[in-house]
Image: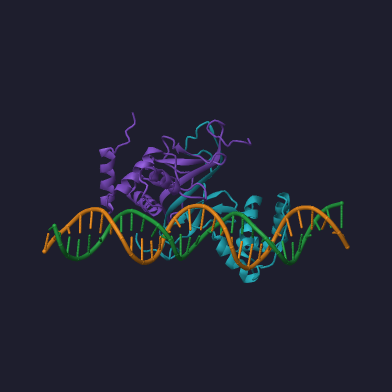
Chain colours: A purple, B cyan, C green, D orange
Amino acid sequence: MKEEQSSTQENNDLARKLAHSGMRMTSQREHVYRTLLNQTDHPTADDVYLRAKADMPEISIATVYNTLDALVKCGLIKQVNVERTATRYCSNMKEHCHFFCGECGNIHDVDYKKGRDELPVKIPRNLIPTQVDISIRGHCINPLSCPNRSKN
Amino acid sequence: MKEEQSSTQENNDLARKLAHSGMRMTSQREHVYRTLLNQTDHPTADDVYLRAKADMPEISIATVYNTLDALVKCGLIKQVNVERTATRYCSNMKEHCHFFCGECGNIHDVDYKKGRDELPVKIPRNLIPTQVDISIRGHCINPLSCPNRSKN
DNA sequence: AATTGTATTTAGAATCATTCTAAGTATTGA
DNA sequence: TCAATACTTAGAATGATTCTAAATACAATT
């Protein structure tokens, strides 16, 4: 049975990380975070807003945007930008990259290889990288997992 | 001396590739393409519009967007999306990836290593990749090339 | 418990990038 | 020359996001 209630563990984590960035724990922030953890399908801010509203009808889209920013700053979620449409959010904090299917529009998490530590790029000495993102485009091969699948 | 005039070579290329996609060669398209080749600093559509207007004052932003789309479809330029702000355009068609400096906002082209053909990711068998993008964030180390440089 | 300062939430307005619309213009092929 | 189609244009519309200003909540004192 899946618990819908707050896990003290996750709440502590949230409260601690918010405090560490000088931010307060609020019911809205807890609820938005929990919404993201409940359904890890890379929702847009608007998706999160609609889902959060189901259980907290008074929440505003501005608070959702504000909270998503706060969670990103705390390192609890990541932004995903594989298309040029709305930013999506990811609560999987394991290092991974994203695969975007141009047919069904779904985003799949893709893991890195075990031994990888070297990137296939020559970064000039005058540029200091802090973050590397690999994003892959393509299509799902399985019509079941890819409902909009039409062309090969 | 830098020639501002049309190179017959590049025009042929443009006309041929447009025709191949069922599109016509127009003075606006030629001018936008030339504008991109003249200054290869990853401009936004609005940058291209302002630069193109200098020599062709009647051109509209709609035509610039339309032309940029056409050039992308023809394979003559590429879109670059390293931030979530306006899409940028790149006329360097050599395979490469992008480095975005969070301090000066400049985008630098970064080459791939010679022998690289394997990506450090485990793509599941049910996903067929068609395009892989690596984008790097960080900062320039040289205050001269990075004017806004403040923090280390 | 009252007070003060600050953070947060909210609705709605504003902004920015981009796309759409509808009308006019240009180009191509018959 | 004519008809069909492509292209350009200004301006309106859209979608995502940020900003604004007022109300509310909270935390740390008094």
Left or right relative to B115: residue B103: left
Left or right relative to A58: residue B89: right
Residue at 43% across, 45% down: A50
| Residue A134 screen position, x and y as percent | 47, 44
Residue at 57% across, 31% down: A143
| Residue A147 screen position, x and y as percent | 56, 34
Which quadrant is the C terminus of chain B positioned in?
bottom left
| Residue B142 screen position, x and y as percent | 41, 62
Which quadrant is the N terminus of chain B positioned in?
bottom right
Left or right relative to A13: residue B20: right
Is B113 above or below relative to C3? above
Is A38 above or below relative to A72? above
Residue at 56% across, 53% down: B79
Residue at 49% across, 44% down: A135
Left or right relative to B80: residue B151: left
Q: Is residue A93 shown to the viewer in this render?
A: no
> How many numbered dots are placed on residues in this image?
0
| Residue A5 screen position, x and y as percent | 30, 37
**Which residue occupies the foreground of this view, A15 or B79?**
A15
Is B27 above or below relative to A114? below
Quarter of the rendering containing residue B38: bottom right
State the residue lying farthest toward the top.
A1
Q: Is residue A13 shown to the viewer in this render?
A: yes
Quarter of the rendering containing residue B148: bottom left
Is B147 above or below relative to A111? below
